[in-house]
Image (spheres, grey):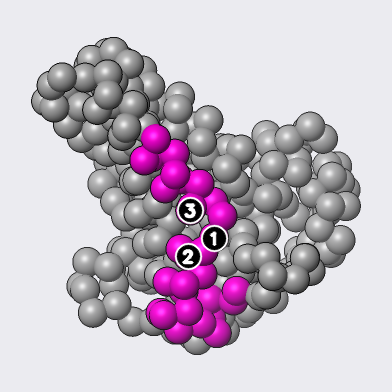
Amino acid sequence: MQSVEGTWSSREYSLDKMTLGELVAGYFTYPGIQIYGLLSAICVAIALYFSDRLLPLIVAAVATGLVYPLVWYLLHRFVLHGTWLYKRPETAAVWKRIHFDHHQDPHNLAVLFGALYTTVPTILAVAVPIGWAVGGLSAAAAAVASGLVVTCFYEFCHCIQHLRFTPKSRILMLMKKRHLAHHFHSERGNFGITNFMWDRLFGTYYPDPKTFPVSATTFNLGYTAEEAERYPWVAELSGLTIANDAAQANGAAQQRADLR
């Protein structure tokens, strides 16, 4: 990773080589997280300035937090793991950045974080209508603040799930195991990050990898050599040869999963 010395990305953040303390430092100094924090503070200030009642603000914030797991599930399953983004030259770079790169190298913190140009519009699209319906401008601002804070929480949990670290919390440990199975056993299930209720309801939850068919496309998300020939834009941007050997892919996945 090459960049201007002194910036966050001037060093390599590889989660399989980092301690929890190093992750916390990297997390809070990441520009995207700082922008989320600044935007959420601005939204809270707007909400309080334009409202003389706390109840609508609380209702809007809680409602947004409750809806967010479903939004994430749908986006993760049907957009990030869909094929339509890489099949178009206009959106291939977006798909590469927001998910393909993460599955290619799950330890790379730089591509684990969501891209602001996709996350912020999504938060606004979800939170503003909820908040506005509850209480107009002030509640909409509270809802957006909630969406930003929930996103920060999701991002940190996601980091922990890829860090070489054993959580003491049983709940966090179960989250970690489910998500690692998504990366190293089969990407066709366990789409939740902190909440797997929607996986259970829609039949994509598997607590034990032994009960779920192994996938040969956990690293390339179905963007195989054949797909790269038909839709070359992600391959051109990556400068990579897309692996198409199922045995090799599964062997690599097992080796990396064994590190944990």
Query: What residue is drawn where x is 40% and y is 27%?
Result: 126
Query: What residue is drawn where x is 39% and y is 35%?
Result: 42
Q: Is residue 209 magenta?
A: no
Q: Can you identify the residue that label 3 sits on? A: 33
| Residue 186 located left or right of residue 199 | right
Most extreme residue toward the front is: 49
Residue 132, quarter of the rendered image: top left
Mark 3: give few (<14), some (14-19) or many (20+) Cα within 10 Å. Answer: many
Q: Give yes or no for contact between labels 3 and 2 (Cβ–Cβ under 8 Å).
A: yes
Q: Give yes or no for contact between labels 1 and 2 (Cβ–Cβ under 8 Å).
A: yes
Residue range (magenta): 13-42
Q: Give yes or no for contact between labels 3 and 1 (Cβ–Cβ under 8 Å).
A: yes
- Classify mark 1: helix, strand or loop: loop
Q: Position of residue 166 (x, y in %)?
A: 33, 82
Residue 13, quarter of the rendered image: bottom right
Q: Position of residue 18 (x, y in %)?
A: 51, 82
Q: Can you identify the residue that label 2 sits on? A: 27
The circle drawn on residue 243 is: none
Which amino acid is tagged 3?
Answer: Ile
The circle drawn on residue 30 is: 1
